[in-house]
Image (cartoon, helix red, strand yellow):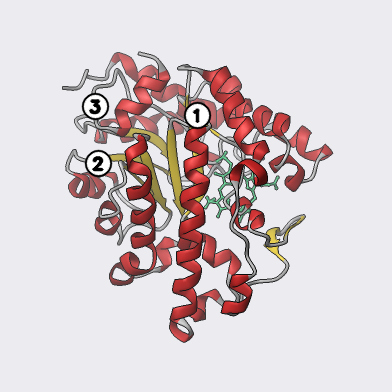
């Protein structure tokens, strides 16, 4: 079975020879190849240069042959494309120099046109698809409206209480732009979409759907007819599994503090599950321990029809490459013991 079929089938809870494996933030700082390029270019240059995007996306796959390649980009590229000024401060990460404070400022954001505004991303995706064919699934992505809003809104934590109508307008606006952005990625050839709701976990179960889930559902409903599986990731997802399921995503990607057995109870074989090795274990344990932990996850999910092996949050920068190798290998070798499903 090739990696693309394996990955697609797992997303759709269909038969696989073994669960596919990839890692969030597989392209990045733990790889010496990335560090070499990063020493010569700013992060923002890397994000906007076709050859560099293609190269960085492929680096982890060339080294470790995961079943999926996520395009090297960032969830903050979309608001940047809408006209917000993104700065990357060394040691601090990306920050917008001016955050949205009122409706007037929201209205100054422009409607983006992917072909004109992110041609480098679309051509990279086409290039990657050409190279990968069925040897790996190509994943495109965006942030969830809630998570993107957390980076572009002034006093984000307070505005939900103090000016909910402004926040709803911001969320609606980002939702509309995200539909266009992800649709363009599908047209450029991605095999799967992941929506990162990294900050969804700060919402209570009763608030989650009205502030985050509903916008994700709108994006999913819009993209569904394209037939590309959609993964939704929430970092702190323990209390939100039922809410995540309601978005209609094909795959729920859970944080490392959530349990796979709880996710199975919620997904009931109708939605696939992705996750959820603790990235601190991936960084600190020995390769042998990582192999054992991975086998435990595979055992837990052995009877479940749709499972994608992954971490519960992105790979941490100081993670030894050998540990990532042990993780991926442990899954690849599981084919021998894995029962052919259905
Ligand atoms: O390999 C991949 O997963 C693809 C590339 C990718 C990046 N960012 C590259 C990146 C993806 C999928 C993202 C998503 C992203 N970006 C999220 C959601 C997932 C998550 O981590 O919760 C968020 C919240 C962002 C915003 C962002 N980008 C922050 C807060 C930071 C600084 C902190 C950090 O983790 O470095 C970034 C920088 C960033 N994005 C780097 C990379 C490789 C590091 C850049 C560098 O220092 O060289």
Give whichever of discs 3 and 2 has the lower sequence position: 3
Left or right, residue 341 beside residue 208: left
Q: CA distance from mark 3 to mark 2?
A: 11 Å
Residue 152: x and y, percent? 60, 67
Q: Residue at x 35, y 27 (%)?
A: 8
Q: Nearer the viewer, residue 232 or 107?
A: 107
Residue 160: x and y, percent? 45, 78
**In the rendered image, which quarter contains the N terminus?**
top left
**In the rendered image, which quarter contains the C terminus?**
top left
In the image, residue 196 sits, relative to residue 324, either above or below, namely below
Residue at the disc numbered 3: 14
Q: Residue at x 50, y 64 (%)?
A: 173
In the image, residue 323 sits, relative to residue 117, either above or below, namely above
* Contact flag, marks 1 and 2 (Cβ < 8 Å): no
Give whichever of discs 1 and 2 has the lower sequence position: 1
Residue 164 in sight = yes
Residue at the disc numbered 2: 271
Does the residue tagged 1 have its C-beta within 8 Å of any atom of ligand 1? no
Q: Nearer the viewer, residue 28 or 129?
A: 129
Q: Residues within 10 Å of mark 1 (few under 14, many from 20)?
A: many
Residue 23 in sight = no
Give the numbered dot on residue 208. Answer: none
Residue 61: x and y, percent? 56, 24
Residue at the disc numbered 1: 189
């Amino acid at each position: 079975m090739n990696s693309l079929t394996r990955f697609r089938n797992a997303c759709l809870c269909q038969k696989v020879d073994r669960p596919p494996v990839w890692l969030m933030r597989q392209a990045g700082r733990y790889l010496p190849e990335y560090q070499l390029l990063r020493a010569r270019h700013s992060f923002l240059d890397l994000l906007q240069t076709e050859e560099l995007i293609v190269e960085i996306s492929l680096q982890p796959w060339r080294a470790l042959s995961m079943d999926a390649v996520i395009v090297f980009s960032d969830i903050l590229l979309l608001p940047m494309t809408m006209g917000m000024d993104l700065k990357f401060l060394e040691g601090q990460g990306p920050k917008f120099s001016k955050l949205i404070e009122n409706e007037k400022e929201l209205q100054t954001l422009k409607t983006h046109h992917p072909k004109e505004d992110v041609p480098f991303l679309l051509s990279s995706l086409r290039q990657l698809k050409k190279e990968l064919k069925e040897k790996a699934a190509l994943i495109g992505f965006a942030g969830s409206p809630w998570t993107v809003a957390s980076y572009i809104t002034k006093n984000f934590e307070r505005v939900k209480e103090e000016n909910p109508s402004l926040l709803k307008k911001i969320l609606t606006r980002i939702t509309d732009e995200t539909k266009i952005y992800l649709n363009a990625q599908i047209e450029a050839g991605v095999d799967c979409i992941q929506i990162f709701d990294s900050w969804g976990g700060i919402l209570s179960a009763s608030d989650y759907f009205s502030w985050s889930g509903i916008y994700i559902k709108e994006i999913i409903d819009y993209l569904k007819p394209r037939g590309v599986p959609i993964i939704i990731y929430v970092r702190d997802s323990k209390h939100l599994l039922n809410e995540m399921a309601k978005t209609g995503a094909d795959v729920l990607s859970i944080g490392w503090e959530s349990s796979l057995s709880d996710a199975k109870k919620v997904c009931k074989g109708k939605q696939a599950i992705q996750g959820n090795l603790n990235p601190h274990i991936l960084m600190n344990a020995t390769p042998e321990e990582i192999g054992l932990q991975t086998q435990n996850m595979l055992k837990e999910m052995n009877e479940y029809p749709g499972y994608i092996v992954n971490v519960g949050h992105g790979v941490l920068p100081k993670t030894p490459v050998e540990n990532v190798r042990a993780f991926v290998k442990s899954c690849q070798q599981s084919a021998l013991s894995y029962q052919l499903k259905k």
